[in-house]
Amino acid sequence: MSFDVKEMQRDLRGAGVDGWLLCDFRGRDPIALRLLKLPPGMRTRRWFYFVPAKGAPRKLVHKIETAALASVPGTTAYYAGQQELQANLKKLLGGAKHVAMQYSPGNQIPYVAMVDAGTVELVRACGAKVVSSADLVQKYEACWTAAQLATHRAAGVAIDRIVAAAFKLAADAVRAGKGITEYELQQFIRAEFAAAGIVADDGPDVAVNANASDPHYGPNAGNCAPIRAGDFLLLDVWGKTKDAASVYYDITWVGYLGATVPEKFAKVFRVVRDARDQAVELIQSRIAARKPLAGWEVDKAARDVIEKAGYGKYFTHRTGHNIGEAIHGNGANMDNLETHDTRRLIPRTCTSVEPGIYLRDFGIRSEVDVYIGEREAEVTGVVQREVLALLA
């Protein structure tokens, strides 16, 4: 089992809820499946698993799939018809008044909103108030072990080196007049990843000029731009080691293919840099003071800087995302734009901080990773302070 029942029950009591109801139908809730680490098996009917704040866990499964939850502890009840399901679900909850589920009021945190509205209604009909499990999910899905932090650092060393090599390759090609495309530079990074034992789900993003104004731009062989003198170049690179349960390292750097960076680029970068630093400083100060900090507050800190500089409408995404075994993890995001993320930043989690300004001719983003420890938060890699003058 992937969690300690007694520890979870302490968390439930601390959160003031009577229990956590995990349920699924045909794999709709991957969070529940991961938490319980269910082995492969026949699960074509609805199942429910309730961890009360006190007492033994309880299961409800269909009569033709009696072994659906055999791998997890607890007593088992069964159902066949819908009326029997409803009656036994009420017994399963045992009079609980506040039940945590993968639910988000108003879908404010869609990353955990896995339970359909009808199932929420079913639970409410049993007399329980459904509350979000978002903070519980974060603890059990987003916290790193010491070994995982080590894989992050190892990936960071390799990726920082590869990014520097990629900028140098672009500069050397321009100096020599040989020419290189976004796609060719992307393939160079991928080859370096393979040699260094780094893997990624996709990417990296290699973008020049107006292409850098698309935060999710990715070149391919049939759709890419040449990299030439006078171009602005953005590299968004992420990856992790091949170790079991390794976690990602994710950064964005920018450079200019010239000897001196034009002021139009330097000016916008300074705004983005200051927004990034303001967000990082807020995280570090609150963690050091042991004061609570929600993801939306970090986003606001960065966004206020950009709005004050007059670029607010050009910052079109959240300030950062949780990082884990997946590049976008299930912990708190630094978001007060796309969502209002009220989840607190908790120890042993990691977030990106990556404000950006996307104008018509070019886009600038600066991204660092911030690991949150028990008493301090740290940027885990090299921090860019100015646009790189690649032909200097």
Image (spheres, rainbow, N blue to C red):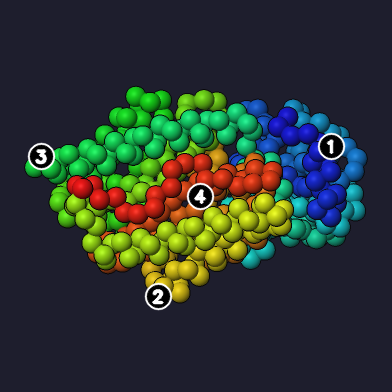
Tell me: residue 74, above or below residue 10: above
Where in the figure is residue 301, as x and y percent of width and height? Answer: 54, 65
Instruction: Provide the residue designation for mark 4.
Output: 352
Question: Between disc 4 and disc 1, whose residue precedes?
Answer: 1
Question: Between disc 3 and disc 2, whose residue precedes?
Answer: 3
Rate crowding at label 4 as few (under 14), some (14 to 19) or many (20 or more) other CA atoms within 10 Å. Answer: many
**Label total for image:** 4
Give whichever of 6, 170 is nearer the camera: 170
Question: Between disc 4 and disc 2, whose residue precedes?
Answer: 2
Label 3 – label 4 distance at C-alpha = 36 Å
Residue, x 84% and y 43% (percent of image)? 10
Where in the figure is residue 197, as x and y percent of width and height? Answer: 41, 25
Instruction: Provide the residue designation for mark 2.
Output: 310
Rate crowding at label 2 as few (under 14), some (14 to 19) or many (20 or more) other CA atoms within 10 Å. Answer: few
Left or right: 115 as drawn, with respect to 127: left
Where in the figure is residue 379, as x and y percent of width and height? Answer: 52, 46
Residue, x 58% and y 32% (percent of image)? 148
Q: What's the residue type where badge 1 is placed?
A: Lys
Where in the figure is residue 259, as x and y percent of width and height? Answer: 19, 52
Q: Nearer the viewer, mark 1 or mark 3?
A: 3
Residue, x 45% and y 73% (percent of image)? 307
Instruction: Provide the residue designation for mark 1.
Output: 6
Q: Are marks 4 and 1 in contact (CB under 8 Å)?
A: no
Question: Between disc 3 and disc 4, whose residue precedes?
Answer: 3
Q: Quadrant of residue 76?
A: top right
Label 1 – label 3 distance at C-alpha = 65 Å
Q: What's the residue type where badge 4 is placed?
A: Ser
Instruction: Provide the residue designation for mark 3.
Output: 176
Question: Between disc 2 and disc 1, whose residue precedes?
Answer: 1
Label 3 – label 2 distance at C-alpha = 39 Å
